[in-house]
């Protein structure tokens, strides 16, 4: 079985999934970034399909960019501009060609955390 990548976003300030949050996925090589996917979270805070499916999976370095500022504005949680958190980039490596990688974001207007999920 080939590897794949999934993600989801939880709004920890409101205690619910972050629906409607745009996410872009980039493949990183040195100083070069190439966008390979862009999706939006559903009512469960997840993308409707893997952001990097099995048929496109390759090991390497990637970056997920979460457009947190747009979501925070739309949900009424934004403070004055400039926002403390706007775009949240997470750079990570995937070295196992057979693994399921899950990279979630726990988000609030003034902080976030992430981890390798299952």
Image: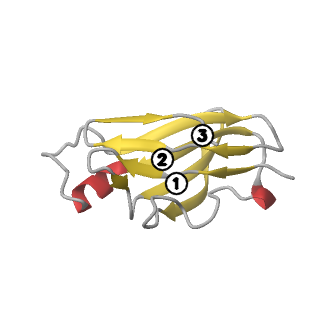
State the image coordinates of residue 34 (x, y, percent, origin top left). Answer: 62, 50
* Distance from the alpha carbon under mark 2 to that under mark 3: 17 Å
User: Colour mode?
Assistant: secondary structure
* Distance from the alpha carbon under mark 1 to that under mark 3: 19 Å
- Tell me which numbered mark, 2 or 3, is placed earlier along the sequence: 2
Image mark for residue 117? 3
The answer to whether residue 38 is left or right of residue 70 is right
- Give the residue displayed 83% in from the left and 44% down from the top: 98
Q: Pointer 1: what residue? A: 24
The reply to whether dot 2 and dot 1 touch (C-beta < 8 Å) is yes
Image mark for residue 65? 2
Of labels 2 and 3, the one closer to you: 3
Mark 3: few/some/many CA within 10 Å (<14, 14-19, 20+): few
Which element type, helix, strand or loop, lies under badge 2?
strand
Specify the quadrant that holds the C terminus. top right
- Give the residue displayed 48% in from the left and 47% down from the top: 65
Image mark for residue 45? none
- Tell me which numbered mark, 2 or 1, is placed earlier along the sequence: 1
State the image coordinates of residue 109 (x, y, percent, origin top left). Answer: 25, 42
- Give the residue displayed 52% in from the left and 54% down from the top: 24
* Distance from the alpha carbon under mark 2 to that under mark 1: 5 Å
Mark 2: few/some/many CA within 10 Å (<14, 14-19, 20+): some
The answer to whether residue 69 is left or right of residue 4 is left
State the image coordinates of residue 25 (x, y, percent, origin top left). Answer: 57, 51
- Tell me which numbered mark, 1 or 3, is placed earlier along the sequence: 1
């Amino acid at each position: 079985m080939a590897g794949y990548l999934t993600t989801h976003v939880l709004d920890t300030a409101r205690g619910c999934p972050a629906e409607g949050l745009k996410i872009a996925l980039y493949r990183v090589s040195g100083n070069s970034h190439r966008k390979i996917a862009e999706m939006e979270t559903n009512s469960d805070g997840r993308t409707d399909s893997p952001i990097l499916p099995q048929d496109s999976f390759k090991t390497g370095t990637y970056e997920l960019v979460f457009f947190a500022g747009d979501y925070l504005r739309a949900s009424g949680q934004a403070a004055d501009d400039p926002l403390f958190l706007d775009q949240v980039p997470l750079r990570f490596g995937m070295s196992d060609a057979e693994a399921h990688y899950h990279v979630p974001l726990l988000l609030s207007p003034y902080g976030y955390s992430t981890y390798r999920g299952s």
